[in-house]
Amino acid sequence: SFHHCQDSTCYLSKLETSDGDPVEVEGDCFHWITGVDNETFPDYPTAIVYEEVLDAIVHGQFIFGFDYQNTSVGYEASASIIYKTPDPLDVVRSQFRFELRSMTLVNPDRVEQGETPDDCLFLCVTWREFRCETVVHQERDSKCLLSRTHFHDFNATDFKPHDFAYVYARSYLNDYSPVLGGIALNTTGPIYTNISHLDECARFCSKETSIQCESFEWCFGERVCHLHSERYLDVVDGGNYLTGTSCIHYSKRDDQLFSRYPHQSLTTSQHHLVSSHTTPEACAKLCVEDMDEVCQSYDFCTSCISDDYGVCSEDNEGTTNLCYLTQHHVGEPDLKLTKAVHCDHYSRDVFGDQDYASWVASQRKSNKPYTPGAMTGLAFGMIFLGILLVIGSLALVSAFKPTAVPKDLALNIIPSRSAGSVAGESDI
C-alpha cells in the first residue's frame, strides 16, 4: 500500500495497515491499497463512508437502479445498517465485530491453537471456563488469544503491535432481537444523541446504570438512541407503542445467556417439564426468571417420540415444543448429556453479571445461597412465626390472668392537655 500526500510525497509500505505512530505532514494524505485485480483504489475509513451513506439516505439522495426485463427499475434507500461482523448471516461470525488489525493482547486469559479466524471465533463461542468476550487470531503462529474482558473495556496499553493479528469482539447487538415495523415504545428512559450505529446503541443499553435496560430503539433519521426498562412483550398487550416510525426496536434476548447443544438433553430424572407449545426464547425467559430455584440450564424438545422417551417421558407423547428446566449444568463433573433426536440442551453461561465459573465460586463461598423464591418464603415464614408468637403470648396472658385486680394496683386515666395530642387520646 502507499500514502500519497498533497505535498507530492509518496510513502510506500509492505503492509495494508499502519504499524507505527502517525507521521505529521502538511496537507491531506490518501491511503491506497492493492485490490484483488491488482488495481489500486482509495481506501476511505469505514466510518467516513458510512456517515456519507447515512446522510444521503436521510436527505433522500441515495437513489440507485438496475435493468429488469428490459425495464429500468429505480429505488430510493430508506435505511442503512452497518455490519461490522465478518459475516452477518453466519451463526458464529455474526456474533462478533472486527475491531483491530496488526494488534494483539498483552495479557490474554487463555491461549489456544487456531489455524483460521473461524477456529478462534468458534473457540470463543464454545469456551466453558469463562464467557469469552474478545478473541485475537495471530495468523503466523496459528494462535487464538481469548479474554473475558470486552474490547471496549480495555485500555490502549492492553494491546501491542503484532503483524497479521486480528482482534474480534462480541457484538452487543447479539444479545437483542429486532422487532420490525418501525416499533417505538412510549415508555420513558435515557436518550443518547449522535448515535450512528445500532451496535453503539446496544452497547449503551448493556452498560446503562440508571435503569435496568431491557430494550432500545435506534432512530437513524434523528441518530438518537432511546433506552427502556421494558421489553416489547411487556407493553404489546396494552398497546403502549407506536408503529411506522423511523426507528428500529430491539428487545433483550434471554436465550443469548445460554449455549446450545443440538440433539442432546438431560434425562427425565434430571429435569422437569414447565411448559409446552412454547419457544426456546420463552423457555430461556422461564429459566432466568425462575423464583423457585436457580435454573442453570433447560432442554427444549420440538416433539416427543418413542426414541426420546428417556428425555421427554412417554406421558408427553404427541406434545410439541416442550420446555424442561433443571438445576444441573454441563460444567458439573461427570454430568453427561443424552442423545435426543428432537431436543436441544441449553446451558446457562451468565448468572447476573458473572460467568458460570465465577458464579459457582461465589456459591461455594456463600453460607446462604438462597434463591429469590427461597428468600420470599423465608420472609413469609418469619411473619408467620411472629403471628404464632403473638397468639402464644395472648394465650399465656389469658391463662395466667389474675381473678381480681390487686388492691395495691391503681389505674388513673387522665385527659391529655398537650396541643399535639389526637382528639380523644388519653395518657395512662
Image: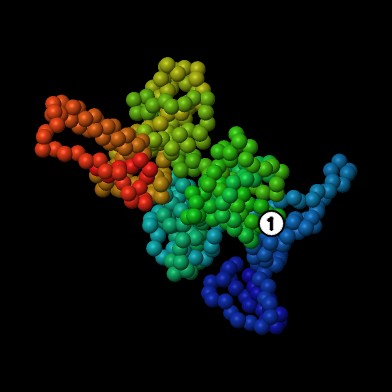
**Which residue is at a point 43% across and 27% down the rendered structure image?**
274
Vertical comparison of 300 with 314: above or below: below
Q: Examine the rendering and report whether any part of residue 281 can be seen.
A: yes
**Which residue is at a point 69% across and 80% down the rendered structure image?**
27
* Closest to the observer, 425 or 212: 425
**Which residue is at a point 42% across and 25% down the rendered structure image?**
273
Q: Quadrant of residue 222?
A: bottom right
- Amino acid carrying mark 1 in the image: Glu
Looking at the picture, the colour scheme in use is rainbow
Residue 388 place in picture, x, y as percent: 24, 30
* Closest to the observer, 198 or 97: 198
Q: Quadrant of residue 177?
A: top right
Could you tell me which secondary element the residue under label 1 belongs to?
loop
Taking the image as shown, residue 26 lies to the left or right of residue 353, namely: right
Residue 289 place in picture, x, y as percent: 43, 37
- In the rendered image, the quadrant that contains the C terminus is top left
For disc 1, the marked residue is 222
Vertical comparison of 247 with 102: above or below: above
* Closest to the observer, 298 or 7: 298
Q: Examine the rendering and report whether any part of residue 176 can be seen.
A: no
- In the rendered image, the quadrant that contains the N terminus is bottom right
Q: Residues within 10 Å of mark 1 (few under 14, many from 20)?
A: some
Vertical comparison of 60 with 349: above or below: below
Residue 204 place in picture, x, y as percent: 54, 55
